[in-house]
């Protein structure tokens, strides 16, 4: 990577209100310089491929219970307050903010300009301040990078201050524990402390966009990947972690718009980010060649481990965490779109890793069903991935990203429903989980089969084929698909014990209905009728 030329003088703390006084300031360092300093500071180890392997410390994932939004005149009536959107006092925020600024008096600070939103009309200008070089490199990779001309006239709207080594005092600072992420929409400041998990930065900015875009621009923010075909057909891939969102969107036959966060304006889909943050557990060059190849010089790997005696990453090693991650710029994917925008989506895929083996590998949804399954945001957690989980557990996250939604989930679902009707987009539910039985008995869906099914939907190969309704979930299932064994399309047919399948399907149906109870008073009857119908009473 080449160093970025700087056609302007570096700002100093006294001349820029967003940069506090500090011991040493490094502004807009190139990836090479940040990599060098990270190694010099002992923040990481260089892998065989040239990537920087870092450890995030105590936290190897986000801490949603320690995320807050300042409650003031701007947010009090707009935010859906509760366990996800926890209120924080404005005065305590300012107290904590000043405490963090004072903490930096003798510290080294890495500062850079960044952007979120590939469409200029909806773009957010950011000033990112970190105390660790590798986290500033992460910001370089994951956010959009303003060019030389843009940097000269750059005016930051938001400031993101991330200090992993700074810990709050819950008794005086108002946090739950020592780590925290706090968003202040009035001051336009994000504070992150006590955690080295870099994903907190990108998801905090995502939270900001999830609040601003619907209210100020009527744009639907989405936790999804997006790609585009040779004829300009845009496709969206929604899904929670582990469902295949990044993997399936990185299709060599299509061009990647982005792997995680996008906005849908009237006739435009645009990426929020400038990079990818992919799960790399069990990564291989054979199954995911684009992602594997992207983890080269300058990329970041979080919490991975080496093959003993080497600097070669062992992607199967989950001894530190199952949530191992890789961060790299979008242009590390050879077929990435630049700028990362696309047209109105023609196809939308909801991805779920159904560990119970109930849902079909592919099914078609009506707009009303799309709203129901979007609000449900279903996948399953597997045994062994979290403490205390000994069998698969149904997991629901509204809009496939409840942790990042400041507004009520129904507001996002209504926007999606309107856009689906206006665009005529086809919506598909894809099970990337199990078939032939639940986890431990059945088999994981073949990635090759999933790719074939998605490709058939994208290419219109399913249009002349008959569909039938699923007996419990009501989704429309294709009776055949080129390149797919016919029996695989019918999940019940793949089970040896049909009665066991019926019992499992009923249990999952009741879980869906129970989860949807909070929305029964806020969605219309057409959406409520899309609830699965158990064959047996609870």
Image (tube, helix red, strand yellow):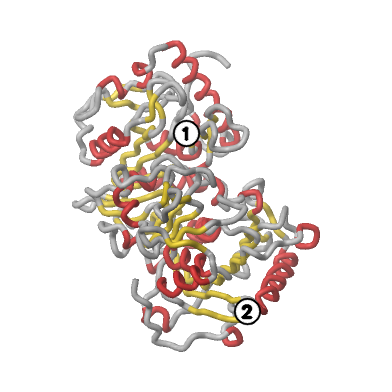
Q: CA distance from mark 1 to mark 2?
A: 51 Å
Label disc, if present, on residue 527 of the rendered structure: 1
Disc 1 or 2, which lies upstream in sequence? 2
Dividing the picture into quadrants, the one containing residue 238 is top left
In which quadrant will I find the C terminus? top right
SS for dot 1 = helix
Residue 451 shown left or right of residue 376 in the figure: left
Quarter of image, res 522: top right
Nearer the observer: mark 1 or 2; the answer is 2
Q: Position of residue 439 (x, y in %)?
A: 46, 26
Q: Do residues under tags 1 and 2 come within 8 Å of each other at their CB atoms?
A: no
For the point 45% across and 56% down, the residue is 301
Work out whether residue 387 can be spotted: yes
Q: Name the mark on residue 20.
A: 2
View extreme (front): residue: 309
Residue 160 x %, y %: 56, 68
Depth check, front residue: 105 or 39: 39
């Amino acid at each position: 990577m080449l160093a970025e030329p700087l056609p302007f003088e570096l700002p100093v703390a006294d001349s820029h209100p967003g940069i506090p006084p500090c011991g040493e300031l490094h502004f807009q360092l190139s990836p090479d310089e940040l990599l060098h300093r990270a190694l010099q500071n002992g923040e990481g180890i260089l892998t065989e491929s040239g990537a920087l392997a870092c450890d995030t410390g105590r936290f190897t994932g986000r801490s949603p219970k320690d995320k807050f939004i300042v409650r003031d005149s701007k947010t009090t009536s707009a935010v859906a307050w509760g366990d996800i959107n926890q209120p924080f006092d404005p005065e305590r925020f300012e107290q904590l903010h000043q405490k963090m600024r004072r903490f930096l008096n003798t510290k080294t600070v890495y500062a850079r300009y960044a952007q979120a939103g590939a469409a200029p009309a909806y773009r957010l200008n950011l000033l990112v301040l970190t105390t660790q070089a590798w986290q500033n490199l992460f910001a370089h990779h994951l956010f959009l990078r303003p060019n030389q001309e843009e940097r000269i006239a750059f005016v930051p709207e938001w400031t993101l201050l991330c200090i992993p080594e700074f810990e709050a005092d819950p008794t005086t600072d108002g946090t739950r524990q020592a780590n925290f992420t706090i968003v202040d929409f009035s001051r336009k400041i994000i504070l992150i402390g006590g955690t080295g998990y870099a994903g907190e930065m990108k998801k905090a900015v995502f939270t900001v966009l999830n609040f601003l875009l619907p209210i100020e621009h009527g744009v639907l923010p989405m936790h999804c990947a997006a790609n585009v075909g040779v004829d300009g057909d845009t496709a969206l891939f929604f899904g929670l972690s582990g469902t295949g969102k990044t993997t399936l969107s990185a299709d060599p036959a299509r061009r990647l718009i982005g792997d995680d966060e996008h906005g849908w304006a009237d006739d435009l889909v645009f990426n929020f980010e400038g990079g990818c943050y992919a799960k790399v557990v069990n990564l291989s060059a054979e199954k995911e060649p684009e992602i594997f190849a992207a983890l080269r010089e300058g990329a970041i790997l979080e919490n991975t481990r080496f093959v003993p005696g080497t600097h070669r990453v062992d992607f199967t090693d989950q001894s530190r965490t199952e949530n191992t991650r890789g961060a790299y710029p979008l242009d590390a994917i050879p077929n990435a779109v630049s700028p990362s925008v696309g047209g109105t989506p023609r196809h939308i895929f909801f991805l779920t890793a159904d560990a119970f083996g109930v849902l079909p590998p592919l099914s078609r949804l009506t707009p009303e069903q799309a709203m129901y399954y979007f609000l449900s945001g279903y996948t399953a957690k597997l045994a062994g991935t979290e403490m205390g989980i000994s069998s698969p557990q149904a997991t629901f996250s509204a809009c496939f990203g409840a942790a990042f939604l400041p507004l009520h989930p129904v507001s996002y679902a209504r926007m999606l429903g309107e856009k689906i009707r206006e665009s005529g987009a086809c919506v598909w539910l894809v099970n990337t989980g199990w078939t032939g039985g639940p986890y431990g008995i059945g088999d994981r869906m073949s990635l090759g089969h999933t790719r074939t099914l998605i490709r058939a939907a994208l290419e219109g190969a399913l249009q002349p084929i008959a569909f039938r309704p699923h007996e419990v979930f009501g989704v429309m299932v294709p009776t055949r698909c080129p390149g797919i064994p016919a029996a695989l399309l019918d999940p019940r047919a793949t089970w040896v014990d049909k009665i066991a399948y019926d019992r499992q399907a009923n249990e999952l149906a009741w879980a869906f209905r129970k989860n949807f109870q909070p929305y029964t008073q806020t969605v219309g009857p057409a959406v409520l009728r899309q609830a699965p119908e158990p064959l047996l009473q609870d």
